[in-house]
Amino acid sequence: MTAIHNPSCLPGEAAVGLNGGLMSSAQPSGRPASVSSPVLSSARSLVSRAGVATLLLACGQAAGSGAPVAATFAYNSKKPAETPLFPEGTIAQSVRADGYRGIWFTLGFKFEYGDKYSGGLGTYTANHQPMAVYAPAVNKTFFTWGGTTARNRRQLVIMVSSYDHARGTVPRPVALYADVSVDDPHDDASLQIDRAGHIWVFKSGRGKHRPGIIFRSTHPYDIGEFECVARQEFTYPEIWHGPAASASASADGDGFFLLFTKYFKGTKNGAARNLFWKTSADGRTWSEDHALAAFGGHYQTSGRWSGLAADGSGRRITKYATFFNYHPESHVDRRTNLYYAQTIDAGKTWTTADGIPLALPLTAPDNPALLLDLKSQGKFMYTCDLNFDAAGNPILLCIVSRAGEPGPKGDPREWTLLHWAGAKDGKGGKWETRVITQSDHNYDMGSIYVEGDEWRIIGPTETGPQRYGTGGEVGLWVSKDAGRTWARERRVTDGSEFNHSYVRRPERAAGGGEGPGDPFFAFWADGNPSKLSESRLYFTNSDGSKVWRLPYEMTGDEAAPEEIGKN
């Protein structure tokens, strides 16, 4: 059994909904005002009995008491799961599950052509970065997604697993965390691997309603045991390695740089989603929250690049970059404009791509970070991915739409690429904008890959079985001239039962070179946007010629994903 040291089982707090059940404290006294050290020791004991298990945890303890809290889990007999997530009589906040199941979700905002977004959203959102990391040291890709307890259930479970490139297999995945009250993939997690090989999982919070939670594997490259490091206020975690420590090509630095969102009072249209960043040398002690943008609200997608500075000095720099939109009067369905900001000194100063300083936080829509004034054109912008060319110049991928609702009213929905190009010695560049293709939904998210002058986009660019629903059939688009011209090379999926959505690009672990492992070059989930369905997980290779489906159900400890087609 996988073990966890869990902070969420505070007295009186519903903490996990697994197999339709509830994990809560056996103590009815209510949540304590404070909790002692968030760094937790191992589970003390596990006691099973006829459908109820008790796990003693050295967490959630009353301040100063030092006594572990007894947390109980009881199966919900009124609504039995069709396929149990866990064997009868076992429970922990991190246990081996019996298959790879994604969460199905609907926002519930209905229009003539369906929901604003819905379907299989296990790899949602574009603001969770990254969700997979390839570790060359062990030739495995570690990944997280939003899972669920059974094909007919919608409870969110934060899942973690790995793909063994040498063996071509996956283990039984780990169910890391769940909350019985949550069915929302906005709480999905991001994943990173530190230089020592420890796997870090940052579960998104939701404003002040639910905290963000940071988990760390207790052993390198091993998902068998996790500790909870901290509970903090962050939504949409985008977690990157710390700055490069030296001029060495492999010196990716220790610690973390986190970009995230916090919620504030907005208008009658909703909360203001403001952007922040902070740093940590060890993942345990963090700097204060630094405000980045705060004018109405924003969604961002970010990235990290480390390499030699363009000024010829031979110094190594680490660049953190983000692009984001603007929510006029805090109206998320009017998200518009495109802004870009970067830092090469770990946040001490932020600039535009050409080095113009930005005064933070940005508090007005008209500021130097603005790249595209889409508001004046009546257009909206949905972020997808951010990558860099070989020189560290940013490449932004987004969808530009004409409406916030699904259906033809928003057409054409354009897959749009912006590239900071032509700079010499860090100066004299310009933003080049190109439209690659069109899509039929605002949330048709994909990823961009860069290998020299050959760039690829893998995403749901093709019309799927549920037209005007989130996602579609996955296509592979290729440019062989650094993004200037594009052509669709193949349909990666075809004849699918459900739409495919949120195609994610794995990162590469610290000190491991460039690019994801192959296969597991991109991964995503499917699902029916029109009604509740099972959601399955897939991955493909670098040329999109093969697609594998992860096992929805498992009977053994290891399985080979099913190859479902070749193009």
Image (cartoon, grey):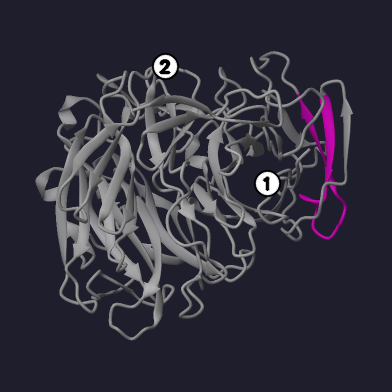
**Mark 2: amino acid:** Lys
Residue indicated by mark 2: 531
As drawn, the residue found furthest toward the bottom would be 313
Residue indicated by mark 1: 223
Tell me which corner region of the image, top left, top right, bottom left or bottom right, holds residue 443. top left
Mark seen at residue 384: none
Compared with 531, 313 (above or below) is below
In magenta segment, residue 56: yes
The residue lying toward the viewer, choosing from 366 and 351, is 351
Specify whether 351 is left or right of 265.
Answer: left
Q: Earlier in the sequence, mark 1 or mark 2?
A: 1
**Mark 1: amino acid:** Ile
Specify whether 185 is left or right of 297.
Answer: right
Disc 2: CA contacts within 10 A as few (<14), some (14-19) or many (>=20): few
Task: Name the spot of residue 31 as percent of width and height, x first.
Answer: 73, 46
Q: Is residue 444 visible to the viewer in this orientation of the structure?
A: no
Quarter of the image where the C terminus is located: top left
As drawn, the residue found furthest toward the left would be 377
Specify whether 61 is left or right of 104.
Answer: right
From which residue to which does the magenta span run?
52-74
